[in-house]
Amino acid sequence: MRLIVNCDDFGYSKAVNYGIIEAYKNGIATSATLMAGMPGFNHALELIRENPGLGCGVHLTLSAYKPILKTHKTIVNEKGEFYKNLLECKDLNKIDLDEVYNEFCAQIEKVTNAGVKITHLDSHHHVHTLEFLKPVIEKIISKYNLPIRGGLNYKLNHDKVVPFEGIFYGENTSVETFKKIIEKQYDIVDVMTHPAYADSFLMESSSYNIKRLEELSILTSEKLKNLLAENKVLLCNYENIF
């Protein structure tokens, strides 16, 4: 079994970034996905350069902080910030899909232009899995031909969709959860994680905060490392498989 342990939210804040690097250097994390529009973006770039073995993708974002482009009308609130939940738009049919496509392209290209070799794509709050955004994701895949995290609510004609497990979260933050994933006997699977330390920005902007410290503790634990070794799990990232 090949296991990608991806740390979502790289670039969210310095404390999140440091937690992700700790999970990589002293734990089982192999991959991270970078949020191009968040306050910790430049700090994350410094850490990427210092840790070249960490695979790095783009965490496409429509529901946290601010967009890269400032011309949007349908995907931002009156302050020019993303809605924290797309359902706040009330009518998804009013969302301009061209705005979404242009924003996603801007996020990807900001990461590329910063010198990062992008390994794959996924998204904050799994927005790329939503069926109404299928036309956008199809165009993104056609343009960039990057691997993408699975869990899609639609069929995507793309040979680089990787199976996804999102259960290591909240009440299921435990070594036992990894045992359950191993028992499913995937050939390869991407497991979503959110390790972090805490800082004021994280505490004020995300309801999922203190639990990230628990994730970090588990991802760096000898108990989990031993479980993977006993089951001959091969840790890898997206760059290793395509």
Image (spheres, rainbow, N blue to C red):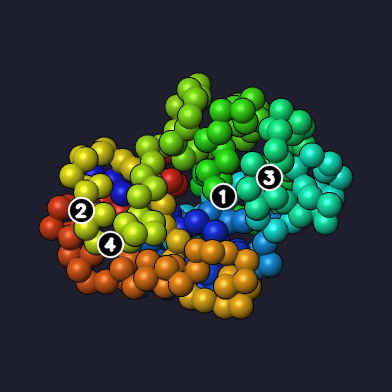
Real-space Cα separation, disc 1 to disc 4, in angstroms: 22 Å
Q: How many marks?
A: 4
Give neighbour class at mark 4: few <14, some 14-19, many 20+ (Cα, 10 Å). some
Callout 4 secondary element? loop
Q: Is residue 185 above or below residue 79?
A: above
Point out residue 157 in the picture as x, y percentages from the top left corner: 50, 21
Q: Mark number for residue 179?
A: 2
Q: Nearer the viewer, mark 3 or mark 4?
A: 3
| Residue, disc 4 | 174
User: Which residue is labeled 1 in the image?
Assistant: 124
Mark with earlier residue (3, 1): 3
Q: Earlier in the sequence, mark 3 or mark 2?
A: 3
Spatial CA distance of label 1 from label 2 is: 25 Å
Q: Amino acid at mark 2?
A: Lys
Q: Residue at x 22, y 58 (%)?
A: 176
Label 3 close to label 2 by CB (< 8 Å): no
Q: Do the residues under discs 1 and 4 have CB atoms within 8 angstroms?
A: no
Q: Secondary structure at mark 3?
A: helix
Percent x, y for residue 6?
43, 54
Instruction: Report, in whole angstroms, how far the alpha carbon at label 4 lies from the one at label 2.
Output: 9 Å
- Identify the mark nearer the N-term, 4 or 2: 4
98 sits to left or right of 163: right
